[in-house]
Image (cartoon, rainbow, N blue to C red):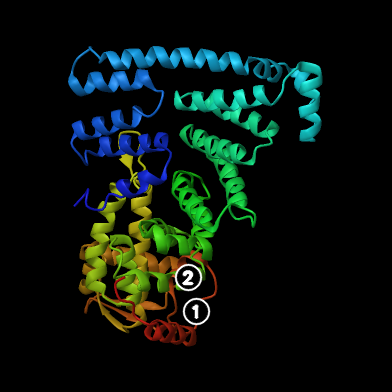
Amino acid sequence: MASKYDLTPRIAPNLDRHLVFPLLEFLQERGLYPEEDILKAKIELLNHTNMVDYAMDIHKSLYHSDDVPQDMIDRRAEVVGRLKALEDGAAPLIGFLQNPNAVQELRADKQYNLQMLKDRYQIGPEQIDALYDYAKFQFECGNYSGAADYLYQYRALCTNSDKSLSALWGKLAAEVLMQNWDIALEELNRLKEIIDSKNFSSPLNQVQSRIWLMHWSLFIFFNHDNGRTQIIDLFNQDKYLNAIQTNAPHLLRYLATAFIVNKRRRPQFKEFIKVIQQEQYSHEDPITEFLACIYVNYDFDGAQKKMKECEEVILNDPFLGKRIEEGNFTTVPLRDEFLENARLFIFETYCRIHQRIDMGVLADKLNLNYEEAERWIVNLIRTSKLEAKIDSKLGTIIMEPSYTNVYEQLIDHTKALSTRTYKIVHQLLENAPGQTAR
C-alpha cells in the first residue's frame, strides 16, 4: 500500500534531476523501496550530472567495495579539467564582480553596463556567456551556492531572453536545494510572471512551463511559513487548475491537502469540490477521495476508511511527510493537522444532516474510541460555542436547530453560514452533473 500511492514516478519527470535527490533520500529513509533500487536510481541520476565524487561514494555503498569503475575515474578528471577551462573563460568577469569598487560603477541601465564593461574592462558578450556556462557547470557539480550567485549576476547583464529564463530556473533550483525558502519564493513569483506574460513562447510551452512550475513549487509551499495559502493562490487559478486537470491530476493531492489544513478555508473550496466531483472517476488518490466521500457522496463510512489511507499517504509523501525532531520524539506536523481537520469536516457535515447523533457511531466515523470522541466533542462545544449538548445517559449529541457550520466557527471565526446557504450549497452539489471516466 505504501508505495501504491507514491507519486515520485509522476513528479520526477517534471523536475530538474538535482531536485529528485531529496525525494529519493526521503524514500530511502522511509524504506518504501529496496535499498539497492534507491541506490541504483541515484547513480542513474548522477550519471547525467557532474557530481562524480558523490556517484563514487554511492557506487561503493551499493557494491560494498572501495573500488570504482575506471570510467568514473576518467569522468572525474574530465570534469575537473572542464571546470578549470570554464573558470578561466569567466575569470575576467568574475574578477570584476569580486571587486567592490568596480561593481559600484554598475547602474540600473543594462545597456550602459554592457558598454562600460566593454570600454573599461574589455569584457564583452563572450565573457558574459562564459559566466553562464561556468554557473551552469557549478550547479551540475553540486555547488548550488556558487551557481546561485553567478546566475543572479549573469541575469543582471545578459540580453538573451532564453538564457535569462534558463538561468532563472537554475537559480530557483539552487535556492530550493539550499532550502532558502524566502528567496526561492521570490524566484518562483518572477518565473510565474514571465510564464504568464502574453509574449511568452507558444501556448503549448506555456502550459508545460506552468506544470513544471507547480511541481517545483511543492518544495517551497510545504516548507515556507505561508505556503498552504500560497499553493491555493497558485494552483487554484483557472489556467493552472486547467493544466492540472488536463496533464497532471496527481497534483490535486497537494491542493486538496492545502484546503483541508488551511486555517482559513476559503470560498474557493466549494468550487474545488466541483473539480473533485469531475475527477473522482478518472483519478485515484485517498486525499481527494476523502473529500468526495464527504461532500459529493455523503459517504461517511467511506470517509472513515479513506482517513486511515490518507494518514498512510501523508507519512510516505516526500512533501507532506516532513518530520520534525522534538527531543526524543519525531512528529509529522501535517499528519496531525490533517487528521484534526478531517475529523472536523466529517463532524460538520454529519451534524448538518442529523439532529440526534449516537456518540458511539460518531466515534467510529471519526476513527476515535468512545472516550476520545467524547473529550474531543466536549472540547469542541466549549471552544467553538457549538449549539449542541451531550446526553451522557443515552450517549447522544443533540444538535440545536440554530446549529451552523462548525468548521467556519472554529477555524475562521467568521459569521456562520445560514440554513438558507446550506440549502443552496446542497442544491448546487445535487444538481452538479456527474462525470464519467475519461
Tell me the tag on residue 20: none
Please identify the quarter of the rendering in which residue 28 is found: top left
Residue highlighted by disc 2: 408
Check disc 1 and give the amino acid type: Leu
Q: Determine whether 178 is above or below 96 in the image.
A: below
As drawn, is 243 to the left or to the right of 291? right
How far across and how far down the image is residue 61, in percent?
Answer: 23, 21
Check disc 2 and give the amino acid type: Glu
Q: Are marks 2 and 1 in contact (CB under 8 Å)?
A: yes
Q: Determine whether 137 is above or below 209 in the image.
A: above
- Which type of secondary structure does the marked residue at label 2 adopt? helix
Would you call the spot at circle 2 few (<14 residues within 10 Å), some (14-19), or many (20 or more)?
Answer: some
How far across and how far down the image is residue 425, in percent?
Answer: 44, 82
Q: Residue 264, can we see it?
A: yes
- Which type of secondary structure does the marked residue at label 1 adopt? loop
Q: Nearer the viewer, residue 189 or 287?
A: 189
Q: Determine whether 135 is above or below 352 in the image.
A: above
As drawn, is 100 to the left or to the right of 313? right
As drawn, is 299 to the left or to the right of 168? left
- Estimate the spatial distance between the alpha carbons at disc 2 and disc 1, rounded to whole Å: 8 Å
Tell me the tag on residue 417: 1
Q: Determine whether 7 is above or below 70 in the image.
A: below
| Mark 2 vs 1, N-terminal side | 2
- Placement of the C terminus among the 4 image quadrants: bottom left
